[in-house]
Amino acid sequence: MKDFYLIGNLPGWVIGLAVLGVVALLAQQFISLKRRLAIGPSTFLVLLRTCVYSVLIFFLFGPAIVENRVARLRPPLTVLIDTSESMAFPASPKPMPEGKPGKSRIDLVKEKLLDGKESLIHKLSRDYDLRLYRLGTSLEPISPDSVGQLKATDQGSRILELLQVAAKEAPPQSALLIFSDGITNGDKKTLDGSPALPIPVFAVDVGETEGFTDARIADLRAPEFAFRGREFKVDLTIQASGLKGKTIPVYFNRGKNLITSRTMNVDADPFEQKITLSFTPRDLGPHSFNVAIPNQPGEQITGNNQKEFKVDVQRDKIRVLTLSGSPAWNYRFLRMALKQDPLIELVSFVFLRTPTDSVDVPENQLSLIPFPIDDIFLEELKNFDVVVFDDFSHRAYFNPVYLDRVKEFVRDGGGLVMFGGSRAFDAGGYADSSLKEVLPVELDGKGSYQTQATLRPVLTASGKAHPVTRLLPDPKANEEAWNKMPPLTAFNRVRAARGETLLTAGDGTADNAPLLTVGRFGKGRTLALMSDEAWRWNFIAVGNRETPQNHLKLIRQAVRWLAQEPSFEQVQIRPIPLSRPGEKVAIKLRVLKDDFTPTAQASVQLRVMGPDGDPVIVSTTADSEEGEYTGDFTPTKDGSYRVEAEASLAGKSLGKDKTSFSVAFPYGETDDGRPRPELLKKIAETSHGAFFSIHDWNEKTFDQMKAKLESQAPSQIVERRQTRLWSTLWPFALVLVLLGVEWWMRRTWGLI
Amino acid sequence: MDRRNFICLLSRSLVTAALWPRLGQAADAKDKRPIQFTFAQVKYRGGDWNPHPLAVTPLMEELMLRTSVEAATARREVSLTDRDLFSYPFLYITGKYEFEPFSQDEIDVLRRFVSYGGFLLIDDALGQAGYGFDKAMRREMLRVLPGSEFKRLPSGHAALRSYYLMRRIGGVRMVNSFLEGINVGNSTPVIYCQNDLGGAWERDQLGKWTNPCTPGGEEQRRDAFHLGINLILYAMTENYKDDLIHVPFIRKRLTR
């Protein structure tokens, strides 16, 4: 629509003066022409000039054409569709007819957006400047055409964080429309402390809370490690919805073995109860536990009915039992070494009196206690890690049958030490006992205990690398330390070594007999030191102004090696960090030979057992000559994975190690599938948007949302276009024509 | 001396005299057995380091008779500068009179000895607090372990329970009814008795007690032997009798 306006802004008196001037000029022109022409032509010429002046005077008023144009705008709208895993849960708890599975939440959203003659997504695209995103752990732009292919696969939904991102990126006077079940598991779980959203959010809740049935382990707190023989506790929070009046059992299992169970009466809806379960582990190493609730009738989500966790059972202390045949300096300094070590708990029995010794006072004036043979060998032995026979012979004190228990103890993984003396090895009658095959030396009953010798410990090739005799990290310094060790004056000669000899007794002859040997029996380890004078390596060294630490270190390292401390293992799997399904996990391990030097030639068998228990053989490659091996494994699902490694060299086993690692999604998206309309409501309310349930979504609600948007951002604007006539060509042409006609007439009439 | 003691002493003297060479052989034979304990006595300059030269053998015989420890019956005489001093983690020092101060080297050696696991039994043969041996020994120990003072051992100390459950201590004379000691960490590597234990242990070559024990007589001597054995076992087992496993048994016996 075009309108004519005079928009000139010259004052009226200026225009008046101009008019007066023009009139005066025209009068003067008429008078002048009259003198030369007749009245008719003079009048005609003045009229022509009057027209020219009139046009010019007219333009002093600023004539202009104003055109108003009405333009319709498409307001910006950002639509977010929650595609986290929880959107795969059923949208409605009501069972479908004919037992068909109910629609998932994401399917319901797709149905609402795509169904109908003219789909909502089409309408939105038509009426709005649409930006469409899928929302999970991040925002991903999608096209309206791809809505039909959306799947609920995101491992988490960071709704509160991503709404802030979307609002920041959206143009002003736009709005957000979100389709979600309201489950959020990012860093922020509530709106508290969040900055207000600058644009309104229209939240469409997907999923029904009414009739929602679920039992879940909402929270589990278990220690990462526990001490063997000491009870540890697991704190659980159990939640249930739609199960009021029912009884729910909770099972606590180690692997597949039931430890204990608990039942809970669900007396509220929603229901929550905290319970504590406990277990006393007996075996060292990593163990997988799980807590499970059986699937309840009508339960929509069963994946959250159990939780797995791993507890690494460690020894709080290495428990050492020493049996000493009599008070002796070896015991004194052994005790000092063990007592000063905070990792070691010592229980010792020293036989202060033999059956042939007589006493001059009644028994009750002696501090002697009866040796609890049955308690020690039949009951308590399993609670020790290392047993030390320190110049001790069983013959005078108990039936050799008790030594069978010691043999079993070592076979089952215990450590056994025999120190020399007049009651040890052959001299102690062990050639005829069941320990004969356990000890790392060969006994034939002919070995002797010799005194008055001067024997220096000499490191063997194995001894140079073995963790028991490696007193200093530098091999040269270590050898020097052993060379400085004071000589021994007493020695048990045995027939031969059966295990690895770490030290020989150097007496200047070529026949260096074994002085310190180590070996294995069953799962256990053994050590034999063929002398009762190791204390001299401590106290004589002090007298020589050397350090006593070498003796203390030898004892402590021996105990740790015997107790199979992980750092003393030949096969060691490195700790495996928490991983995610689908991510490659590099399982690294280190392999050492019997002499504890690294080997890259070992045959390594690596097995990984997933949550289903199916073993997978993982091939390994040696990374370097430092005995490092790596095997790559990609877990497919979340849960606890157990890793077992065994290495051998030239057909001889070097040892085993086992560990476990957890694979989990970091968000716990499927832990609690209950929709959270309350969160969506609050988001809509605080942002001045609106909340809708997806079941109430129809044309009316669409229009409602549209109206609300309209009120905030009008969808049409009026464009005003103004054209000054002066700036067009025709006024100039008109003046030119009038002046041209005047010029031509003047020429015709002979005035020019 | 009553008739019974007299007959006993007489018969022992006769037997000793008759079997003397054999006893010598027996002692040799015993010395060839693995020796676990040697009683080492410190020689020093000045004063009288050896007031009871025959005190050790009776104690060692008693030690072997009553306990499983195999000991050398003869004592070993050592000076603090002997190269093999540290072969004998149990040291006994006694005397009556004030002696010359130890050299700085001797002080250093003794400090290392008691700090790293050795045991020193101090026995005052004079029994005069603040005089003679007592004065010199306290002076020297202040140099060995500066800042450490002798403290009275509690009645429940492991040294008084290491073999016999001792309610009282013995000696030739009862100067103190308690022992004193210097603690290093959880251990008491220096124990001091002012009751002249050596005098109570000593027998002459005929087997006769050299010194009468007053005022307790033979019972007091028996306590001296018991204390000697306890201190040796304490040196060899440290606080063994403080281990938890022993505590209820000992408590039960002491309350009877």
Image (cartoon, rainbow, N blue to C red):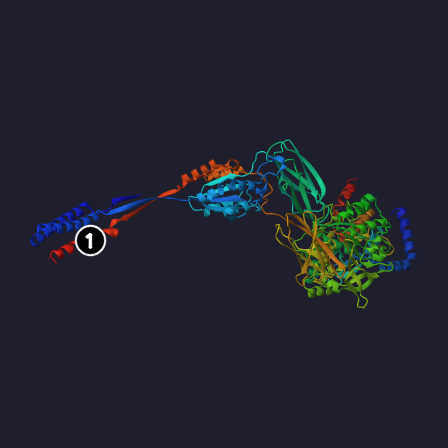
Q: Is residue A286 left or right of A19 when viewed as pictured?
A: right
Query: Is residue A747 at least partly visible in the picture?
Result: yes
Residue A453: image location, x then y, percent: 81, 64
* Amino acid type indicated by mark 1: Val
Please tell me how many numbered marks the rendered image carries. Answer: 1
Between A503 and A486, the residue placed more toward the observer is A503
Residue A651: image location, x then y, percent: 76, 60
Q: Is residue A351 left or right of A237 when viewed as pictured?
A: right
Between B250 and B96, the residue placed more toward the observer is B250
Q: Is residue A365 left or right of A746 when viewed as pictured?
A: right
Between A245 and A233, the residue placed more toward the observer is A245
Where's the C terminus of chain A, which quadrant?
Answer: bottom left
Residue at the front extreme of this rendering: A748
Between A434 and B210, the residue placed more toward the observer is A434
Q: Dot 1 surroundings within 10 Å: few (below 14), some, or many (20 or more)?
A: few
According to the picture, the residue beneath numbered tag 1 turns out to be: A737
Query: Is residue B228 at least partly visible in the picture?
Result: no
Q: Is residue B249 left or right of A585 when viewed as pictured?
A: right
Answer above or below: position of B101 versus A159. Answer: below
**Chain under disc 1:** A
Under circle 1, the secondary element is helix
Residue A452: image location, x then y, percent: 82, 63
Quarter of the image holding residue B203?
bottom right
Where's the N terminus of chain A, which quadrant?
Answer: top left
